[in-house]
């Protein structure tokens, strides 16, 4: 996602190309690393069968992610290219904003190549190959979501002159990373930060703690988020088609100006104008130190 931290690197580290990409070097993975992927994959797929969006589960299937071991990015990209024109490339870590947006605008998804240790199955601060590939890539096989992520990248490039990166980052966070979608009478998971997390896959749908609020572009872009724990609010889209339409139909230049005059909203805030699907009691967040 966009990196608005002040200490982000602004030049590729040694060994990286000018666009920050590096070889995945798939042959270097050890048996332990492949086994870690397989263990993560097996327990997460079982958890997600009744919970994840239809598009996500379909992507896992058509991209053959159930094959044993960490996916080879070249093979994965070949399958993606045939479906939606996207490809997956390895990067050494966080990529500066312009490079990140440019990759998305060109239908290139950047992914870390390392995998967490066996003792880090339940929590990892920095996104690894399981989060990036298992969490993000299945939805890139969906044509509408693939178009949305490209549109986000194109919009990100245009946004750089408006000094509103924090607002745009919230859109990515509450959709691509932590979004929910309505399917019939049910809420389903699609955000990568949820579907790649064993604990949050349950919390996001089952816990009485968080708010679940209908998606509204301006509302989302005003709302701060948690980077260190489960979310206090999840936004629910009606469909990927509606998400894409709202993004393409919005003139972001005046929107950034409008947002600059409005105060940020706390992660747990509920407004009178919100389309509240489930109002959380914030019991989880309230019990945290």
Image (cartoon, rainbow, N blue to C red):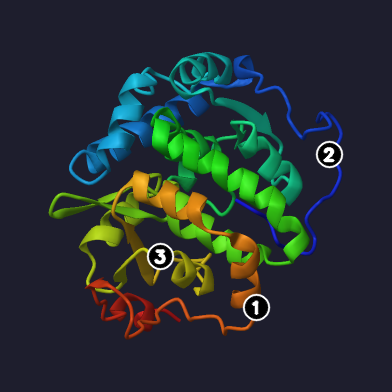
| Picture coordinates of residue 286, whole percent (x, y) | 36, 83
Circle 2 residue: 12
* Residue 113 % position (x, y): 61, 31
**Cβ atoms under marks 1 and 3 closer than 8 Å:** no
What whole-number distance in Å separates the C-alpha atoms at marks 1 and 3?
A: 27 Å
Q: Nearer the viewer, residue 99 or 206?
A: 99
Residue at the image point whose x is 33% and y is 81% from the top:
273
Q: Give 167 or 25, whichever is nearer the viewer.
A: 167
Disc 1 versus disc 2: distance between alpha carbons?
32 Å
Residue plotted at (61% across, 38% down): 104
Q: Marks 3/2: CA distance?
A: 32 Å
Q: Is residue 127 visible?
A: no
| Residue 230 numbered tag | 3
Please, what secondary structure does the residue beneath circle 3 have? loop
Q: Secondary structure at mark 1?
A: helix
Quick one: 289 or 192, which is closer to the camera?
A: 192
> Is 150 placed left or right of 194 in the picture?
right
Closer to the eye: label 1 or 3: 1
- The numbered mark, 1 or 2, whose residue comes first in the sequence reads 2
Residue 260 has which mark? 1
**Which of the pair 78/33 is nearer the observer?**
78
Secondary-structure class at tag 2: loop
Examine the rendered structure and indicate whether residue 56 appears above or below residue 67: below
The local crowd at label 3, few if under 14, some if 14 to 19, many if 20 or more residues have their Cα within 10 Å, is many
């Amino acid at each position: 996602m966009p990196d608005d931290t002040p200490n982000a690197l602004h030049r590729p580290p040694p060994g990286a190309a000018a666009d920050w990409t590096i070889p995945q070097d798939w042959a270097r993975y050890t048996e332990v690393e492949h086994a870690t992927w397989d263990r993560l994959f097996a327990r997460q797929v079982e958890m997600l069968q009744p919970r994840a969006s239809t598009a996500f589960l379909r992507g896992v299937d058509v991209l053959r992610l159930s094959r044993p071991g960490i996916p080879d990015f070249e093979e994965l990209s070949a399958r993606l290219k045939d479906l939606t024109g996207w490809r997956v490339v390895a990067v050494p870590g966080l990529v500066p904003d312009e490079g990140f947006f440019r990759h998305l605008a060109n239908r290139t998804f950047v992914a870390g190549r390392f995998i967490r240790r066996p003792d880090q199955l339940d929590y990892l601060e920095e996104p690894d190959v399981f989060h990036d590939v298992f969490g993000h890539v299945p939805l890139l096989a969906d044509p509408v979501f693939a178009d949305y992520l490209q549109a986000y990248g194109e919009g990100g490039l245009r946004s750089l002159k408006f000094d509103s990166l924090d607002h745009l980052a919230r859109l990515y966070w509450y959709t691509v990373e932590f979004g929910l979608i309505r399917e019939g009478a049910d809420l389903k998971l699609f955000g990568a930060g949820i579907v790649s997390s064993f604990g949050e896959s349950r919390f996001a749908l089952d816990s009485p703690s968080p708010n679940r609020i209908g998606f509204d572009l301006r509302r989302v872009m005003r709302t701060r988020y948690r980077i260190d724990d489960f979310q206090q609010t999840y936004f629910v889209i009606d469909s990927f088609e509606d998400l894409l339409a709202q993004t393409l139909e919005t003139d972001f230049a005046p929107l950034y100006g409008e947002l600059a005059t409005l105060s940020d909203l706390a992660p747990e805030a509920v407004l009178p104008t919100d389309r509240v699907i489930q109002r959380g009691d914030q019991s989880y967040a309230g019990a945290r130190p």
